[in-house]
Amino acid sequence: MLRLYDTMSRRLATIEPIEPGLVKMYTCGPTVYRDPHIGNYRSYLMADWVRRALEFQGLTVRHVKNITDVGHMRQEALEQGGDKVIAEAIARDMTPQQIAEHYTQRFLEDELQLNIIPADHFPKATDHVVEMVSIIEELVKRGSAYEVNGNVYFDVSAFPGYGNLSGNTQEGALQEAVRIEADPLKTDPRDFTLWKLGEPGRDLVWDSPWGQGFPGWHIECTAMSIKYLDDRFDIHTGGVDNIFPHHEDELAQSEAFTGAAVVGTWLHGQHLLADGVKMAKSAGNAFILPDIAAQGIDPMALRYLCMTAHFSARLNFTFTSLKAAQRGLLHLQNRVWELGRDSGPKDETSEADREWEGRFIGHVNENLDMPGALATVWDLTRSDLPPATKLKTILSMDRVLGFGLDGVAERYRVEGKTLAAVGHRADHRSRNQYDEADRHRSELVRDGFVVEDGANGTGVRPKTAWEQRTETWQAVSSSSEVDSLIREPDTFDITVGIVATNYQSDIERCIDTILNWPDSMSVEIIAVDNGSTDGSSEWLENTGARIPSLRVIHTDYVLGAAAAKNIVLKQALGHTIVMMDTSVELEGSIFEPLNRMLNDPRVGVAGPLGLLSKDLQHFHDDERPVGDVDAVQAYCFAFRRSLLADVGLMRESFRFYRNLDIDYSFQFKDKGYRIVADPNLPIKLHEHRAWNELSDPERDELSRKNFGRFLHKWGHRQELLVGAPHHH
């Protein structure tokens, strides 16, 4: 029987249904204020495999997955009345209900593409406020909650087991973990909000005994899980980021309401990372399913990728790994197609079938070991079992895997004109008329079909979207895919590196002015086409074909700022590297002046726009500083290529460009090099598109996070500042 790691008990727990034959399972669903990113779907896939594994073994599963269309707020936002659904509605000039409905449908469509079995119930928070109010009333009556000025709070001190789920059992640790702004209405800062008094003008409010207001985040799951699954159910799933505070608070209020344990097994899946960090919109790495489809990749490849690592381990997503998963999925689909063509009469269930299924479900039952289960499938394809037995067993296993392999034959089916062409080709082959047979084959391939000749005749199927996608040029998915030439000798005097993400006119202007002012030096331009979608890619490719000094490296999606720039640094062959923003226009000679500044071996970085700081907290360019500075701005950032071996590449945790230039400047300063600026260098700055296309809150959030990364590494290094005492 299925055993799963229970977050509460910290051990494997056998799933023994409370009601014989029926497993009741609750999954924390999406907050419908924007498209869920693919990291969210990892935990939904985990829940899907749990359900499939249970049903495979003859159990019935009643599955509930909530839709959060109000109240999903981090605690500090809740104290201030903030709400993500309302905020998005305001931003898009829509009603909260319209926003919620739009993204609910998007979520359901995404799950369909991933072949996730629909839950039996998708209850919406807004439809269950009456139940929430009723539970809150009972908690107040029992002394587990208290009301202050229309706000109701759960009294953590009245629930002795608070913190057991997350392991935050010490009062000090809990107070630190909550991380909330002080709310003077609370008895204890650890207490959490059950009901919030509605602020004037708020759209989404409901009547309650405490006045018009709205529910907190956690109470919705208590109300809906108990309504649809009763006051005891078997499995509660979610991501590890749900454990605290959401599930800790949900557990406390649920058990305080029922007087007993509600959940049998708490199951949590680890993060799907991107570029080594957690996916988040603020990090610029929150990819959604349409991003996958845009690469011609089957969304089901994400299911395959998530199956290659255990759900309890972090999995680092890259488009390189996704492409590998796509190739694996396509290979498996092709094997099923080939087995279907090669199979003879279907045989009865044999001992071999049962043995392979036993090995397979053994992996699944041991804490959902899907990597082991997938490996078993591949072992089966390489076994010496008859094709018909292989096919039947693989399709049986796919009831758990969920790849939809039973639909391969239908998706690969051809008819009419195509079948006639296959027949004509076979006829020519039988007559040894191979030229004519090859002509038919070429026409089929040209028309988008795969032609495979086997022992049992010719198989023809349509090419998948992945196979049809024409690679006009090679593209990379990360800086790690690019060879490092750092140890190679200089080939040019100057390498000018630019990162181009759309805005073709800016790219043209920047490159034209670089070519206009070579300063009688040998100059190469490396342009990283960073996921452009507006025609910039084609322009760069065509221009590179005409201009030998321009080398273009394409990426297949938008890499982080540091990763894209590191591609330039790894590929550059100029004695001096000049990183230049596409908003820059050269109005005169800059390369020879930059080289003169860098001729001093003590100087590490030079550029026209310097920054100074007195405290590492604030950097300014108020007086366009001349000479020694604390950092050079990224508009034009020059250094000797030979220093890369000493200083290293940029830190790729900087996905957004803001403050990356300060951080990289300090990498040079840390090695003892000076940073110098000459504001008289003839450059002109145009509109900075990457900055202006962001809203003020997005700018603040992205900048703040990057500056936090800078301070975490350099905040204690006051001696590196130009004005530090050791400089005098």
Image: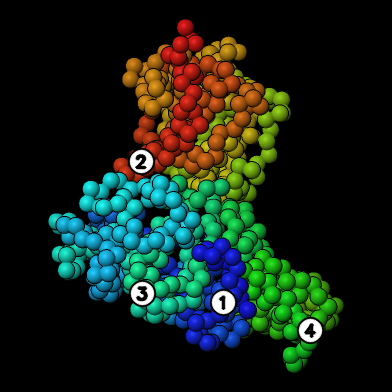
Which residue is disc 3 drawn over?
258
Q: Are marks 3 and 4 in contact (CB under 8 Å)?
A: no
Find disc 1 in the rendering and name its residue.
Answer: 15
Which numbered circle lies on residue 352? 4
Residue 710 % position (x, y):
47, 32
User: Where is residue 253, by image quadrant?
Assistant: bottom left
Q: Secondary structure at mark 1?
A: loop
User: Horizontal placement of 454 versus 476: left or right?
Assistant: right
Q: CA distance from mark 1 to mark 3?
A: 22 Å
Work out whether residue 213 can be spotted.
Answer: yes
Looking at marks 2 and 3 on the same chain, the residue that comes earlier in the sequence is marked by 3
Amino acid type, label 4: Ala
Is disc 2 surrounded by few (<14), some (14 to 19) or many (20+) residues within 10 Å? some
> Label 2 is placed on what type of residue?
Arg
Say the numbered circle drawn on residue 699. 2
330 relative to 73, above or below: below
Q: Position of residue 133 (x, y in %)?
A: 24, 71
The residue lying at 45 percent from left, 31 percent from top is 711
Q: Quadrant of the N terminus?
A: bottom right
Q: Can residue 68 be seen from the camera position used here?
A: no
